[in-house]
Structures are given as C-alpha cells and as structure tokens.
Image (tube, helix red, strand yellow):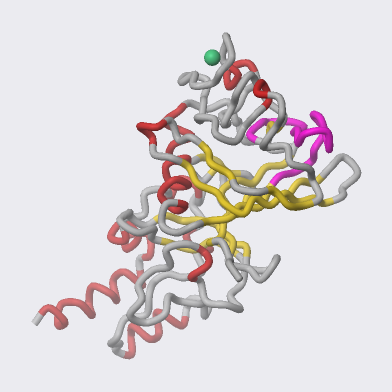
C-alpha cells in the first residue's frame, strides 16, 4: 500500500524540513533568505502519525494549516481567519507553491502582500525583467513578489488592491482600487485598475497620459514597454507600469513618490491584494 510508504516519508520530511520543501515545489524560496522555520503553515497535517512523528511535530510551533481536504490556500484570503500575519505557502490555481507574506491584521485580514518597500532598504530595485518576473528581496522586509505570480494570483478571481503609503511626516495613507488585474506576459503584464477610493490620492490614474500607470505595460531596465522615447525603468531605477514616466514610484531604492502626497520622500509602501467584496 502506498500509505505504508507515506508515513516514513512524512517523518523524514518533518525532521528535515529543508529536504521536504522541494517536494512541495516552492519555486521562490530565494525570498526567504534561509529562514525556513518562519513559514506559518508547513507542513500540512497528514492523516496518520506514529509517536515519533508526533514528537517531531511538537518541535514546531503550532501554526494554522490549510483546512483538511482543501489543500493549500490559493491566496492569503484562504488562510483561516484569526491566523497571525506572516510568511505562508500558497498555491495559486494551476501553479506550483510559492511563499508570500500574508497581512492578517488590517481591514479584516486576508491580504496577500505583493510589494513592500522602505526608503532605507538594502534591496536594489533596478532589476531585470526576469528578476521582476519571479520576485526578489526578502519576504519579511522589502520585496517584490514577482510579476508572473501577481498575474497568476490575480487571474483566479476578481481582485481589489490597496496601496499603503507612509508620507514624510509618518502619516499613513491608502489608495484602494476596487478592481485589479495584470494581463499575462505575452501582453506585457499590462495593469488594469478599477475605481479609486482612499486618502492617498488617485495617483495610479491621471489626466496626463505621460504620468498614467493604469492600463500601462510593465517595463524594466532591459525591457522597455513604456510610452516614453527613452526607457523610464532604466532612467528611474526600478520596474513599474510606466508611461512617460510616472506619478508613482514605489519600486525604488530611496525616497519614493506617490502623486503629490510625497514626491521623492515617501518613507514606505505596501501593496496588498484580496478578492473583491461585493454587497
Ligand atoms: Ca520607451
């Protein structure tokens, strides 16, 4: 029986988590920087244990796990309510596993963090197309989840996005768009946003086509898909949905920009996704 072979395998995995994780096919472990023990929901609870396995499990913190029979969460909104914020394994539909940071405390929780940055970051944001595609940085501090993974998550359902901006006086502002999607790579990861609400200002859409971000393709220093004669991503040292060039500059090593709220001196940014809620 396969189950007779399963228990020793699970036991081995629990004792050697690092060896087990490749079996989960997590492709973005580079975002963890070696801190595997900080994943909140590994491994999923198997159906059978022997005493040694139970002992091995007790070594680990008691953490929320995917509901039995439902597999891994497809995004952070499927992490059980009441769970702590932290690093979780998710598996978007049709995709391998990835690690993400789930923000479970603000606005009813369930938010998938796709970007986090602060002005004193050690992270270099002037990265290539392929680096942006699969993500970089540290999932617990400053990071980009990956343009491909953002696309894969956001195509599962109808999503909303929240931008959280810390201005130069440490005030926190937010900008919500009630729809968010990113087209696939063959369409340049073009951004599609819905209606704005919030306190930060509607900086992602603009009357000026030169500073528009909504409906723009994604550009990096080595892939110019903007509407500018030169390359905005190269000139302004970070990948983004550029036109010619920007009113929002969050993927940047240094003071960030959000419209007129904080031009070049925003202190931090956070971009959160969650399935849209309808009345
Ligand atoms: Ca150009």
How many numbered discs? 0
Q: Which residue is drawn at the image coordinates 14% and 82% (left, top)?
A: 4
Look at the picture and state if 71 lies above or below 126: below
Would you say residue 269 is visible in this rendering?
Answer: yes
Residue 87 versus residue 226: which sits nearer the camera? 226
Please identify the residue farthest to the right as the structure is shown. Answer: 169
Locate residue 20, reporting x and y percent.
Answer: 32, 63
Q: Which residue is drawn at the image coordinates 58% and 44% (left, top)?
A: 193
Which quarter of the frame holds ligand 1? top right
| Region in magenta | 251-269
* Quadrant of the frame with the C terminus: bottom right
Would you say residue 140 is visible in this rendering?
Answer: no
Q: Which residue is drawn at the image coordinates 73% and 31% (left, top)?
A: 254
Locate residue 154, reporting x and y percent.
Answer: 47, 52
Residue 27 versus residue 197: which sits nearer the camera? 197
* Quadrant of the frame with the N terminus: bottom left
Q: Is residue 266 magenta?
A: yes
Specify the quadrant of the image occupied by residue 47: bottom left
Look at the picture and state if 43 lies above or below 143: below
Locate residue 201, reporting x and y percent.
Answer: 78, 43
Please identify the residue farthest to the left as the structure is shown. Answer: 1
Q: Which residue is drawn at the image coordinates 68% and 52% (left, top)?
A: 176
Q: Is residue 124 magenta?
A: no
Locate residue 67, reporting x and y percent.
Answer: 41, 80
């Amino acid at each position: 029986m396969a189950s007779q072979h399963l228990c020793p395998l699970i036991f081995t995995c629990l004792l050697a988590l690092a060896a087990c994780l490749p079996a989960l096919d997590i492709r973005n472990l580079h975002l963890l920087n070696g801190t595997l023990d900080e994943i909140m929901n590994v491994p999923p609870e198997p159906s059978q244990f022997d005493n040694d396995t139970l002992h091995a499990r007790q070594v680990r913190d008691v953490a929320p796990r995917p509901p039995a029979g439902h597999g891994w969460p497809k995004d952070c909104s499927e992490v059980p309510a009441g769970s702590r914020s932290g690093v979780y394994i998710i598996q978007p539909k049709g995709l391998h596993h990835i690690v993400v940071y789930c923000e479970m405390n603000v606005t009813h929780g369930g938010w998938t963090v796709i970007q986090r940055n602060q002005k004193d970051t050690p992270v270099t944001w002037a990265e290539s197309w392929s680096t942006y595609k699969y993500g970089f940085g540290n999932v617990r501090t400053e990071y980009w989840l990956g343009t491909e993974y953002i696309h894969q998550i956001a195509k599962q359902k109808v999503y909303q996005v929240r931008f959280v901006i810390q201005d130069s006086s440490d005030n926190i502002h937010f900008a919500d768009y009630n729809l968010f999607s990113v087209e696939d790579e063959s369409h340049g990861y073009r951004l599609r946003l819905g209606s704005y609400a919030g306190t930060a200002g509607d900086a992602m859409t603009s009357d000026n086509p030169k500073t528009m971000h909504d409906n723009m393709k994604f550009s990096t220093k080595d892939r110019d898909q903007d509407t500018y004669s030169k390359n905005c991503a190269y000139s302004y040292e970070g990948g983004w949905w550029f036109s010619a060039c920007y009113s929002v500059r969050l993927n940047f090593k240094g003071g960030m920009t959000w419209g007129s709220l904080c031009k070049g001196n925003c202190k931090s940014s956070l971009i959160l996704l969650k399935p849209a809620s309808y009345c």
